[in-house]
Amino acid sequence: MRQLPSRFGRALDAGCGSGDLARLLATRATSVQGLDVDPTIVARARELTAPALPVTFTVADALTGTPPGPYDVITCVATVHHLPFADALAHFRRHLAPGGTLIVVGLARAQTRSDYLLDVVAIPLNVAMAWIKNRGRKAPRPVAMTAPVKAATMTLPEIVRDARRELPGARLRRRVFWRYTLVWCSDS
């Protein structure tokens, strides 16, 4: 959210899951379209979303079912590794409005010793974050993903190469928890 303006028009959350990010985007956006291929999780997203929020959830593939743009903001969290990477970036670029922002939080396959070291460090941090996120709750929210799970196949250098080819000027940063962030702003 730090990468986004305080107010913007239309937003697309590709791979929206239970809708947490879509609802957060709705606090700044005129309207938000959430897409996910999992009908069970889309139904859950609809249940969890107040009718007053300007959010619509659709069961659709991000590459073939995206409602027409343009979008001022497109987000894609832990989803792009399920898609043909370069095709997905090109697709999102085409749907982004001039001056719009694309934010991808993706997963990369470990390749180097430092990658594996970060993975080892991330394990206890991941457990700690889950505990912090769920403390005070009587039970975890019953949201089970029924969509297929896929491990990341691209290494970070491969991701950087393809991202720079499809999105010149994209900024990429390695993160803990097996993730990276990609931020790209389209030309005005």
Image: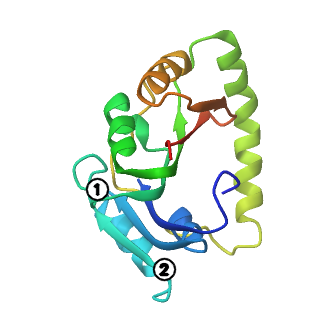
Q: Nearer the viewer, residue 41 or 156?
A: 156
Q: Is residue 76 above or below residue 143?
A: above
Residue 159 in view of the camera: yes
> Residue at label 1?
66
Measuring 41% from the left and 50% from the top, which residue is drawn there? 96
Mark 1 or mark 2, which is nearer the start of the sequence? 2
Image quadrant for the N terminus? bottom right
> Residue at label 2?
49
Residue 156: x and y in percent read: 55, 21
Q: Is residue 178 left or right of residue 43?
A: right
Measuring 33% from the left and 66% from the top, which residue is drawn there? 40
Q: Amino acid at mark 1?
A: Thr
Residue 181: x and y in percent read: 60, 37
Q: Is residue 130 above or below residue 50?
A: above
- In the rendered image, which quarter is residue 23 located in? bottom right
Residue 14: x and y in percent read: 40, 53
Secondary-structure class at tag 2: loop
Residue 17 in view of the camera: no
- In the rendered image, which quarter is residue 82 located in? top left
Q: Is residue 21 above or below residue 127?
A: below
Residue 39 numbered mark, or none: none
